[in-house]
Image: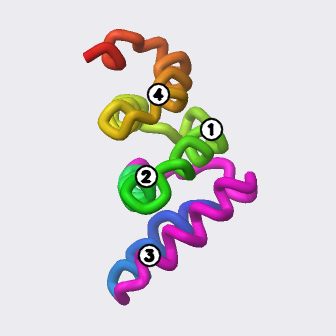
Amino acid sequence: MYKHLFETIFELVGGYGLAEEYFESLGNFISVGRVPEVPNKFVLNALIEYFVPRKVELVDRLIASLRPSSLDYASTIEVCHKHKLFYSQMYVSQLSGDFITSLN
């Protein structure tokens, strides 16, 4: 079900310059629990990078709202560390069992 949302539609909106609208809509659906996972790691990383400079407080909510299997642990920890999202960084570190990466 989510394959079309995260692959086909993402490619289409990117081609038409509608990525901002796509990310805003997707972020809203994730934060209220309507979309529980983002199986495409590229789209998830792009979504997080989109919101960090705009609504960094929403990134914590997005990370906490998604199924853990959706998260790319290493890149999510890196983004959290870079932008001082310590709650999310601890959460993802706990999920991954990797507390060393968080200390670097």
Estimate the x, y position of residue 46 in percent, counting from the top left. 37, 57
Image quadrant holding the N terminus, namely bottom right
Q: Residues within 10 Å of mark 3 (few under 14, many from 20)?
A: some
Name the mark nearer the viewer: 2 or 4: 4
Kindly identify which numbered label has been placed on residue 48. Answer: 2
**Mark 2 vs 1, N-terminal side:** 2
Nearest to the observer: residue 101 or residue 7: 101
Residue marked by disc 3: 20
Q: Residue at x 43, y 52 (%)?
A: 48
Q: Residue 72: name its quadrant.
A: top left
Q: Which of these two is toward me, 85 or 6?
A: 85
* First along the sequence among labels 2 and 4: 2
Is 86 displayed left or right of 5 in the figure?
Answer: left
**Magenta stretch: includes residue 100:** no
Residue 21 highlighted magenta (yes or no)? yes
- Residue 86 image label: 4
Q: Earlier in the sequence, mark 3 or mark 1?
A: 3
In x, y percent, where is residue 33?
Answer: 74, 52
Q: Mark 1 highlights which residue? A: 64
The quadrant holding residue 77 is top left
Q: Please tell me whether mark 1 sits on a helix, a strand or a loop.
A: helix
Name the residue: 45% across, 35% down. 85
The answer to whether marks 2 and 1 mark residues whose Cβ atoms lie closer than 8 Å is no
Classify 1 as above or below 20.
above
- Of badges 4 and 3, nearer the viewer stands 4
**Label 2 to label 1: alpha-carbon separation:** 12 Å
Q: Residue at x 61, y 45 (%)?
A: 61
Q: Is residue 39 left or right of residue 37?
A: left
Question: Which segment did they paint magenta?
Answer: 16-41
Helix, strand or loop status at disc 2: helix
